[in-house]
Image: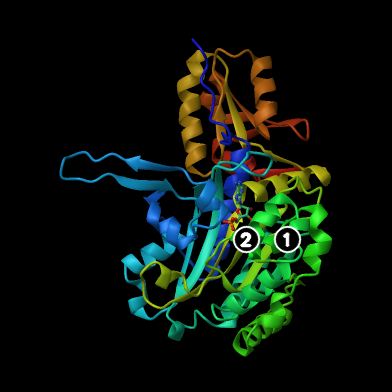
Amino acid sequence: MAVIFKVRGTRDLLPPETELWNRVEQTARSVFARYNFGEIRTPIFEDTQLFLRGVGEETDIVSKEMYTWEDRARAESERSQSLTLRPENTAGVVRAYIEHKLHESGMLQKLFYIGPQFRRERPQRGRYRQFWQIGAEVLGPAWSSADSPLRDAELLEMLATLLEELGLHGWRLELNSIGSATDRPVYLAALREALAPIKDRLSPDNRRRAETNPLRVLDSKAIEDQDLINTLPKIEDFLDRESSEHFRQVLAALDASGVPYTLNSRLVRGLDYYTRTTFEFTVPDGSGLGTQNALLGGGRYDGLSEILGGPKTTGIGFAIGEDRLILALQAQAERDNVVIERKLDAFIAPMGTAQNAGALALAKELRAAGLSIELGDGVFRLRKSFETADKLAHRMVIVGEDEISSGIFTVKYFAAGEQSKVARAELVNALRSSILSARS
Ligand code: AMP
């Protein structure tokens, strides 16, 4: 029979790599909890309209990359419905915010999510068709303070803390303000005017964008176009007083809490709904991400709720590409020559099948005390037990007939190359060790 393989652009995540995924997610959950974020889980598929309106029809995501299908009606009385696998989670979160009337409390809503997203992009290192995002949103009516520059700064400071706690070095925060819904048309008009005479000298992709979505020309990475792009007007010269003041206060709060940033007036990001603060955290070339060096991105989206038919709401959020974060952490560990090994506290080796039952009872006792244990089998020869135990665990406990009757066990310590006799009551303490051991 022909073997069936996973679909292009998807990945299987296996142990021990999943250990790192769990560590990243646990660290994120712990940081989010300290900043008073609660978890939200929204469906993986939604009404296609949500993304058409919430992400924008002109974006690459909506125009080219969505997994959309017509969901069949099951009865005469039903109509088929166009559904889409979520390409991002902000639209879903804002839909849920509206649907559950979260604005009515008047309180700031601080929500985080961790889950898969789907985009039909060309797969390459750091770019997949199913990928994971860890994201958070802060939203609410204006009187909840969701529109305050302090929220932008706190969110960015939280991200810096998260990356530090994960031990990632060398990240860079790039920051820009793309102004409010009233600043943007003025800037867009200036941009179109500046693009008109030079459009034909741009690469075909940017020539098209100059017509359909001129803001996107700004964050183009096409090398041949850079000199021309650098001559285009800058959005910072078009911000109204309120947007400039908002941005100034974001920067001042970041300075006060010591979060380093770089201003990048070309950072406009891909989604239509952004307003004011936009940002990206990147890692330098050679950090394991190939050309995909954006680790996470986000920004303020003050009009999104209204676009989705909801009440007037301001908000800001981010999405971390978890796959990329993991790649960067793995590349860093490799560069620093750190091997992160997970070793069990102990391997229990029954000597002969007659000891299997006693060994299971001992394993149960030790596991209940919180130790990580693998159980051998009495059919293994001593040599095989040794080899397996050395691979998996810090120590081996030998369970023979004498040990069961006397309650005194032989424990072998692999790193020290020693062994000793330990009474059953002392075993838990003797076997306790940290699960992660770093070796240089
Ligand atoms: P976006 O939702 O486009 O703002 O992306 C936020 C982050 O998600 C990016 O900075 C990437 O780290 C990650 N990301 C976006 N698209 C993909 C993809 N196809 N594969 C892996 N990560 C992605």
Where is residue 281? Give x, y as percent. 69, 61
Where is residue 6? Give x, y as percent. 54, 28
- Location of mark 1 (residue): 199
Q: Could you tell me the amino acid type at mark 1?
A: Lys
Residue 224: mark in rendering: none
Q: Is residue 388 left or right of residue 130?
A: right
Q: Could you tell me the amino acid type at mark 2?
A: Glu
Q: Nearer the viewer, residue 207 or 237?
A: 207
Question: Which residue: 49% across, 46% down?
Answer: 66
Q: Tag 2 or tag 1, which sits nearer the N-term?
A: 1
Where is residue 254? Give x, y as percent. 69, 78
Label 2: state its secondary structure.
helix
- Res. 134 image quadrant: bottom right
Question: Which residue: 66% across, 51% down?
Answer: 325
**Crowd tier of the residue under label 2, counting other residues whose Cα lies within 10 Å: few below 14, some 14–19, many 20 or above:** some
Q: Nearer the viewer, residue 439 or 389?
A: 439
Q: Nearer the viewer, residue 230 or 318?
A: 230
Do the residues bearing badges 1 and 2 touch, measured as CB atoms within 8 Å?
yes
With respect to residue 168, does 76 lie above or below?
above
Residue 211: mark in rendering: 2
**Tally of marks:** 2
Q: In the rendered image, is residue 161 in sight? A: no
